[in-house]
């Protein structure tokens, strides 16, 4: 898994850069159209659609290099980690009123729960990425 990650990182940076730039341009165009009509809801919608577009492009391009099956047990672990993270964050956010505490908590606790669950399940990709980070 680690060799695959390095190959993708080394060889395909331009694909990620161009798809991200395309998403940013798409976001800008949608913002120009939607913000005057729908204000913050338009901005949020434009960002969501642009990010979803980047995700779809990268999934199609990335499939060539890292084929995946959605029914794989590994992807069920990601789904479970996401569900656990959402339940905890939504539960706590309903209790806390301070916006900054909500944002900081969501980032730190959400990331910690997600990564912690995947480390607990000994996910190959997370462990390989952790090794790469620790080596740097």
Image: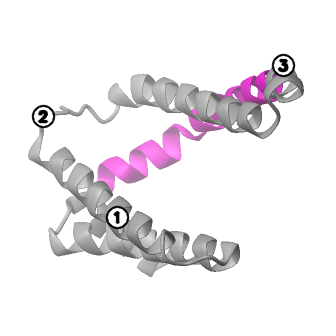
Is residue 125 shown left or right of residue 109? left
In terms of image quadrants, where is residue 115?
bottom left
Q: Mark 3 Cα within 10 Å, few/some/many (few <14, many 20+)? A: some
Which quarter of the figure has residue 23?
top right
Instruction: Judge from the rendering whether residue 128 lies leftward or rightward of residue 48; answer left or right.
Output: left
- Point 62% across, 70% down: residue: 103
Look at the picture and state if 2 lies above or below 135.
above
The image position of residue 134, as x and y in percent, is 43, 80
**Mark 1 vs mark 2, CA separation in Å:** 21 Å
- In front of the other: label 2 or label 3? 3
**67 or 104, which is in the foreground?**
104
Residue 31 painted magenta: no
N-terminal label among 1 and 2: 2
SS type, badge 2: loop
Label 1 Cα crowd, 10 Å radius (few <14 / some 14-19 / many 20+): many
Q: Label 1 belongs to which residue?
A: 85
Earlier in the chain: of badge 2 and badge 3, it is 3
> Taking 129 as reference, is 52 left or right?
right
Q: Which residue is mark 2?
A: 71
Cα distance between the residues tagged 1 and 3: 34 Å
Q: Residue at x 32, y 63 (%)?
A: 87
Disc 3 designates what residue?
A: 33
Magenta stretch, residue numbers: 1-30
Residue 75, quarter of picture: top left
Residue 48 pos. (x, y %): 60, 35
Which secondary structure lies at badge 3? helix
Front residue of 85 and 126: 85
């Amino acid at each position: 898994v680690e060799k695959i990650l390095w190959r993708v990182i080394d060889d395909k940076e331009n694909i990620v850069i161009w798809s991200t730039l395309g998403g940013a341009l798409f976001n800008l165009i949608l913002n120009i159209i939607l913000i005057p009509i729908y204000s913050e809801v338009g901005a949020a919608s434009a960002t969501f659609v642009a990010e979803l577009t980047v995700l779809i492009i990268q999934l199609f391009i990335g499939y060539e290099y890292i084929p995946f099956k959605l029914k794989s047990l590994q992807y069920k672990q990601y789904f479970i980690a996401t569900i656990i993270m959402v339940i905890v964050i939504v539960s706590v956010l309903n209790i806390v009123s301070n916006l900054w505490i909500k944002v900081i908590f969501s980032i730190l606790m959400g990331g910690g729960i997600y990564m912690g669950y995947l480390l607990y399940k000994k996910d190959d990709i997370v462990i390989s990425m952790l090794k790469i980070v620790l080596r740097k």
